[in-house]
Image (cartoon, grey):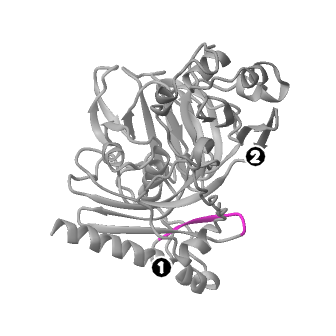
Amino acid sequence: MLPQNTMSHAHKMKLRWFVTLSTLPLLGVVTAFGIMPQTDAISRAQQTLIEEVVLPSSTPVVGNATTFWHSERIQRGDTIVELLRRLNVDDQAASDYLRKHRSAEVLRRLSVGKQVQAETDVDGALLALRFINNDANQVIIEKSGDNFKTRILPALTEQRVQVRTGEIKSNLFAATDEAGLPDPAANQLADIFGGDIDFHRDLRKGDKFTVIYEMNYINGEPARTGRIISAEFINHGRAFRAAYFQTTEFTGDYYNPEGKSMRKAFLRSPIEFSRVSSGFSKSRFHPVLNKWRAHKGVDYAAPMGTKVKVTSDGVVSFVGKQGGYGNVVMVNHQGNFTTVYGHLSRFAGGIKKGQRLGQGEIVGYVGMTGLASGPHLHYEFKQSGIQRDPLKVALPDGKPVSKEQMEAFTEKTGELFARLDTLRDTRIAKLD
């Protein structure tokens, strides 16, 4: 460690500095985001609580009151001495405290990649050290007389509403990536409109989507993608719209502007974004048996281990091995419907005969057991014991908004649908 006064005053003044305030908010970063203004309707739907943080007022900088902020990230194999050197801290007392004191152990355990900010005076003496610990809490280590003290403050959390629009050029995921829509929101988008749009076959170049969704932040950093509030998908020139509506204290669903549920009683596909490798047919050449025979289901080509979801609420009627199906799960729904999931590599943990499943729960994972030439899912949809083409059969609808809640639904979602109108008009205006 260099002696405290070995650097010239002029050299020290050349150090890169961020602010000249004696105090600075943690991480002291102000970032501009494209965030949709929080409307009353969205506020009511979200019930978001955002804590207002008041910035400290600036004080005049006089003589040696000048302070400097330096920022570094924890590197693999870092020591306290090396970290302080990179932060331009020249303070033996601070080094001793951070290396030895029990309350500074939170710094010594900080994960690789975490950012640390140090405030020093012109001579390199440490005034404050600030960082986010491994539990996402704020930590402030600051000078207190001749010693130092450590304070741990709860994380600052907030929820922001964001908007993304995109256009299909090849597939849904490529378009959502280009639009900057997080994968969890892209999955929600596919689930919301999956009953009306077959994302395996129906997408066309030029289809468009708009998504209004929640993003949760911790200490100003994005932490988790929240729920889609409302969305629009234009497929083949036809617009599908949905908004989230809370039907009970603990549950809610997505509905179109007329209050019709976006969720069909059955999902169109048990696998997200896979490819139909063999459709429903009365005569198909079997790749393993090498002969022509009916194929009364749909095959979805997907990588080994891809999750397979049950397409509707139901009760498991069979789990195990059965002939050409290999590992197969069969589920009964609403009395006269049955779905079949064959060629699985393995079953979901704990699944058994008689078990009740909710739509979208995992039943197993793609494999190539039984009569299969490669990894894929064989999916069947039976009505009254007769196989139907799941890609063409008319699926029963979910429950609409009740008459008793229709007025509340109209009031709470009207502004959300109006916002989609505004965004669409804005997009069209830009194209013009």
**What secondary structure is found at the residue carrying circle 1?**
helix
Q: Over which residues does the magenta segment extend?
A: 249-255
Q: Which residue is mark 2?
A: 153
Residue drawn at x 82%, y 38% is 145
Q: Secondary structure at mark 2?
A: strand
Expressed as whole percent of the image width and height from the top left, the position of residue 131 reads: 65, 37
Q: Residue at x 25, y 58 (%)?
A: 207
Q: Give amino acid for label 2.
A: Leu
Q: Which quadrant is the C terminus positioned in?
A: bottom left
Res. 351 visible in picture: no
In the depicted structure, whether residue 429 falls above or below residue 62: below
Q: Which residue is mark 1?
A: 415
Q: Quadrant of residue 277?
A: top left
Whether residue 50 is visible? yes
Q: Nearer the viewer, residue 251 or 103?
A: 103
User: Which one is closest to the eye, mark 2 or mark 1?
Assistant: 2
* Crowdedness near tag 1: few (<14), some (14–19) or many (≥20) residues, C-alpha within 10 Å: some
Give the Cα separation between the discs numbered 2 and 1. 38 Å
**Of 422 and 127, which appears nearest the observer?**
127
Q: Amino acid at mark 1?
A: Glu
Q: Where is 432 relative to 336, above or below?
A: below
Residue 56 lies left or right of residue 294; in this view the side is right
- Residue 294, percent across and down? 33, 36
Residue 271: x and y in percent read 45, 40
Which image quarter holds the N terminus?
top right
